[in-house]
Image (spheres, rainbow, N blue to C red):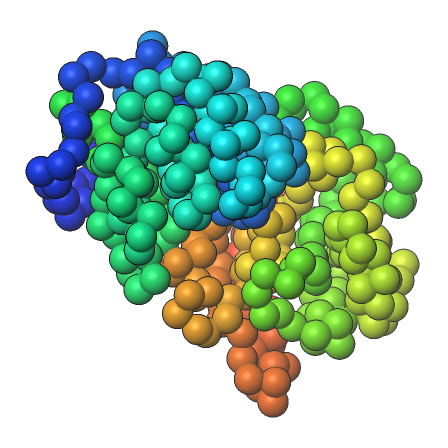
């Protein structure tokens, strides 16, 4: 992962009530304890803090679902699993005690909830930084006004802005990070790919496009019929083999799309049943990832795989706000259309895909050995 000189963001001076740290903290708790995609979009901020604070122990406070990935994050030194998740009103004393046991000098909260804010306030952690959000901000002694609800920047940039804000208070220069943010063992990925290709009769000349029709209810999405249409159009290219992926509870949806593809011999179903890391090791050899705005999309982005993402048109879910963290040249984005315009929009997606140079995983080892 590389870094470049910081492009200054809008300056937000500390408020008069803030207690400014005099030196880098010996231990810092980083809290992004919501969905998979939200957590991955905080990784650029983690990288900024890791680069600027090499002597600080960075501790991720996460739910059990994202803990396996947190343990693979090169910027994180230790992981604490939040139990129960999320913190509820009756569990504030328990959570405050858990924070207190960490004996951390500071905490950065990338997305706050009121019970979390109260638990941190009661924990004794001296420096607590979070976005200036509603009543929550009263319980942090360092805040940054961002107005994320306006969706004027990508979520990952809002997260990096918080990291810059902390470093500015410490008087430490900051650098923009560059992808990839997640690198897996290349030999493990190669072995996953070999076994996958052998078990499905794929050849080294095939270009493997992953299509993920599930979305976990986190955002609007195409219908199974729409994804089936997209699959048929993709398979007009004789070099493409399609992998329809599914998380827990999405297996039937994946089978519907495979059935609607019109060419089951070149369409393969992969249902992730070995956990998040195994799923990531499969995504890591995708020549292209296609899905709606969902956690696995951001996993592909963290791995710097080429992505085509479909986003809802409303402001809170738009493509700018939930932009992936792969390189700009590897990102394709399209808005979801009205149902009557779905096929025209999917045809547009096919045109965008055909404009890509799908060089293939095996032909570009530098992409994934970083």
**Residue closest to the far bottom:** 340
Q: Is residue 48 visible?
A: no
Quarter holding the N terminus is: top left
Q: Could you say where residue 346 lies in the image, as x and y percent from the top left? A: 60, 75
Q: Nearer the viewer, residue 43 or 199?
A: 43
Q: How many marks?
A: 0
Q: Position of residue 260 (x, y in %)?
A: 83, 72
Can the viewer see residue 138? yes
**Left or right: where 251 falls relative to 222:** right
Front position in the image: 187 or 317? 317
Residue drawn at x 51%, y 66% is 311
What residue appears at the point 45 percent right and 40 percent down from the top-left corner?
116
Residue at 80 percent across and 64 percent down: it is 253
Quadrant of residue 196 in the image? top right
- Horizontal side of residue 252 vs 317, given as left or right: right
Direction from residue 119 to residue 198 in the image, left or right: right
């Amino acid at each position: 992962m590389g870094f470049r000189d910081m492009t200054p963001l809008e300056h937000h001076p500390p408020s008069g009530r803030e207690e400014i740290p005099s030196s880098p903290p010996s231990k810092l708790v980083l809290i992004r304890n919501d969905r998979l995609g939200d957590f991955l979009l905080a990784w650029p901020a983690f990288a900024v803090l890791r680069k600027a604070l090499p002597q600080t122990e960075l501790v991720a406070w996460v739910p059990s679902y994202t803990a396996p990935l947190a343990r693979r994050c090169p910027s994180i030194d230790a992981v604490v699993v939040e139990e129960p998740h999320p913190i509820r009103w009756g569990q504030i004393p328990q959570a405050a005690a858990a924070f207190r046991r960490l004996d951390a000098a500071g905490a950065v909260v990338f997305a706050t909830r009121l019970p979390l804010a109260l638990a941190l306030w009661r924990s004794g952690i001296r420096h607590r930084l979070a976005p200036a959000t509603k009543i929550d901000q009263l319980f942090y002694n360092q805040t940054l006004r961002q107005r994320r609800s306006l969706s004027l920047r990508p979520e990952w940039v809002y997260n990096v802005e918080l990291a810059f804000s902390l470093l500015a208070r410490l008087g430490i220069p900051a650098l923009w990070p560059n992808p990839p943010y997640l690198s897996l063992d290349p030999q493990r990925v190669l072995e996953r790919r070999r076994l996958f290709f052998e078990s499905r009769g794929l050849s080294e000349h095939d270009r493997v496009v992953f299509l993920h029709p599930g979305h976990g209810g986190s955002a609007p999405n195409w219908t199974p019929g729409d994804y089936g249409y997209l699959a048929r159009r993709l398979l007009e290219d004789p070099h493409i083999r399609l992998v329809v992926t599914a998380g827990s509870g999405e297996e039937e949806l994946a089978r519907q799309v495979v059935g609607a593809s019109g060419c089951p011999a070149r369409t393969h179903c992969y249902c992730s049943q070995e956990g998040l890391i195994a799923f990531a090791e499969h995504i890591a050899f995708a020549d292209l990832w296609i899905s709606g705005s969902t956690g696995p999309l951001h996993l592909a982005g963290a791995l710097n795989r080429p992505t085509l993402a479909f986003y809802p048109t409303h402001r809170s879910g738009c493509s700018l706000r939930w932009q992936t963290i792969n390189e700009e040249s590897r990102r394709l984005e399209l808005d979801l259309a009205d149902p009557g315009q779905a096929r025209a929009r999917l045809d547009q997606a096919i045109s965008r895909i055909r404009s890509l140079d799908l060089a293939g995983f095996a032909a570009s080892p530098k992409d994934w050995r970083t």
